Amino acid sequence: MANMKNAKKKIKTIAKEKKLNNTYRSSMRTAMKNVEKMVAENNKEKAIDALNTAIKRIDKAGSKGIVHKNYVARNKSRLTKKVNEMK
């Protein structure tokens, strides 16, 4: 346990940041799963809408530094390719 005032404050700050980071990460992952689900159902219109949401959330997580820029690029490309290959 921290004894100094600044260390106690840092513990609180880290907890707040972790909570926010988990929110961004989980919403990003959910959006990605929704795209995968629409592709599996072969519903192109909903897949495109889900893709736009997923790209927005992936970019947001990348800009916040929660995920690496290569992870952002790889997943945006992968999801876009899946949607574009649909009939």
Image (spheres, rainbow, N blue to C red):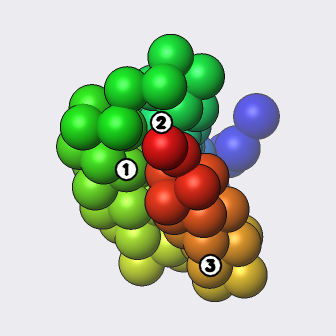
Residue 85 is situated, as x and y percent measured from the top left of the image, at 58, 55
* In this picture, residue 1 sits left or right of residue 36: right
Q: Residue at x 24, y 37 (%)?
A: 45
Q: Is residue 87 above or below residue 78?
A: above
Residue with the most extreme front position: 87
The quadrant in which the N terminus is found is: top right
Please state which amino acid type lies under the numbered disc 2. Val
Estimate how packed mark 3 is, as few (under 14), some (14 to 19) or many (20 or more) residues with alpha carbons within 10 Å: some
Q: Are marks 2 and 1 in contact (CB under 8 Å)?
A: yes
Residue 56 is situated, as x and y percent measured from the top left of the image, at 30, 61
Q: Residue at x 60, y 63 (%)?
A: 81
Residue 48 is situated, as x and y percent measured from the top left of the image, at 30, 47
Q: Which residue is under mark 3?
A: 73
Estimate how packed mark 1 is, as few (under 14), some (14 to 19) or many (20 or more) residues with alpha carbons within 10 Å: many
Residue with the most extreme top position: 41
Please state which amino acid type lies under the numbered disc 1. Leu
Question: Which one is nearer the viewer's eye here, 61 or 9?
Answer: 61
User: Disc 2 or 3, which lies upstream in sequence?
Assistant: 2
In the picture, the disc for residue 51 is 1
| Numbered disc 2: secondary structure | helix
Of the two numbered discs 3 and 1 in the rendering, the one whose residue sits closer to the viewer: 1
Of the two numbered discs 2 and 3 in the rendering, the one whose residue sits closer to the viewer: 2
| Numbered disc 1: secondary structure | helix
In the picture, the disc for residue 35 is 2
Please state which amino acid type lies under the numbered disc 3. Ala
Q: In this view, does 86 lie above or below 26?
A: below
Residue 22 visible in rendering: no
Estimate how packed mark 2 is, as few (under 14), some (14 to 19) or many (20 or more) residues with alpha carbons within 10 Å: many
Q: In which quarter of the image is residue 73?
A: bottom right
Q: Are marks 2 and 3 in contact (CB under 8 Å)?
A: no
